[in-house]
Amino acid sequence: MAGSSSGQSTSRTKMAVILGLVFIAGIIFTGLFNIGLSSTNEMEFCTSCHSMQVNLEEYKESAHYLNTSGVRATCSDCHVPKEFGPKIVAKVVAVKDVFHEIIGTIDTREKFEAHRWDMASRVWAKMKATDSRECRSCHNFDQMDLSSQSRIARKRHSKAVDEGLTCIDCHKGIAHMEPDEPEEPSEDRG
């Protein structure tokens, strides 16, 4: 009987060590994963691809970069959700941008401009679908002091609330140049 008790004790000890190692490995993995996520949210990372230099130049001319309050919204503030699930989805979807940079689809200004409408339209559609979630992490109709806004802004924001509009409905060119909509192909060409 004594041997059986000793075997169970050794088995339990091994199991406790294994569970402890798995727990520690989980903590390390989680920490490294969070560091990786955080580093891919840095503006330096976002603008490290050649094609993003076009966006960076435009962004530096916007109120989100330089303004009277000194508050700066970076790439991730506008393009990456704060909540974990949507953030992971956004990161997975963003892999396509890196892929297209690598294969040369958007690696020059000319190629970038040729695809700008489609890329912008996808971002606008996502923002519309999420009720401009990322914009609202800083801007919220409920927290706006409409009385301190210009007459035109006050009127438009009040109307937007009444009509259920979201930020991107009116502010498409706020941080980047709004692309021209492509012309429809003429139907009278035979």
Image (tube, rainbow, N blue to C red):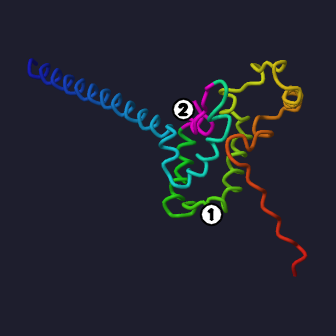
Q: Give the CA distance from mark 2 to mark 1.
A: 35 Å
Graded by Cα atoms within 10 Å as few (under 14), some (14 to 19) or many (20 or more), the crowding at tag 1 reads few
23 versus 178 height, above or below: above
Along the viewing direction, whichever of 120 and 1 lies nearer the viewer: 120
Identify the secondary structure beneath mark 1.
helix
| Count of marks, rendered view | 2
- Residue 169 locus on image (x, y percent): 80, 40
Q: Earlier in the sequence, mark 2 or mark 1?
A: 2
Give the residue drawn at x 61%, y 40%. Answer: 79
Q: Is residue 99 magenta?
A: no
Q: Quadrant of residue 9?
A: top left
3 versus 74 height, above or below: above
91 versus 111 height, above or below: above
Indicate the quadrant containing the N terminus: top left, top right, bottom left or bottom right: top left
Along the viewing direction, whichever of 12 and 72 lies nearer the viewer: 72
Q: Which residue is mark 2?
A: 84
**Which marked residue is nearer to the observer: mark 2 or mark 1?**
1
- Lateral position of residue 150 relative to residue 119, left or right: right
Identify the secondary structure beneath mark 2.
helix
- Lateral position of residue 135 relative to residue 52, left or right: right
Along the viewing direction, whichever of 16 and 190 lies nearer the viewer: 190
Give the residue drawn at x 83%, y 21%. Answer: 146
- Lateral position of residue 44 relative to residue 21, left or right: right
Graded by Cα atoms within 10 Å as few (under 14), some (14 to 19) or many (20 or more), the crowding at tag 2 reads few
Indicate the quadrant containing the C terminus: top left, top right, bottom left or bottom right: bottom right
Give the residue drawn at x 58%, y 46%. Answer: 56
User: Which amino acid does the dot numbered 1 rest on?
Assistant: Glu
- Residue 157 locus on image (x, y percent): 84, 29
In magenta, the rendered stretch is 70-87
Q: List the single residue furthest toward the left.
A: 3
Q: Which residue is mark 1?
A: 110
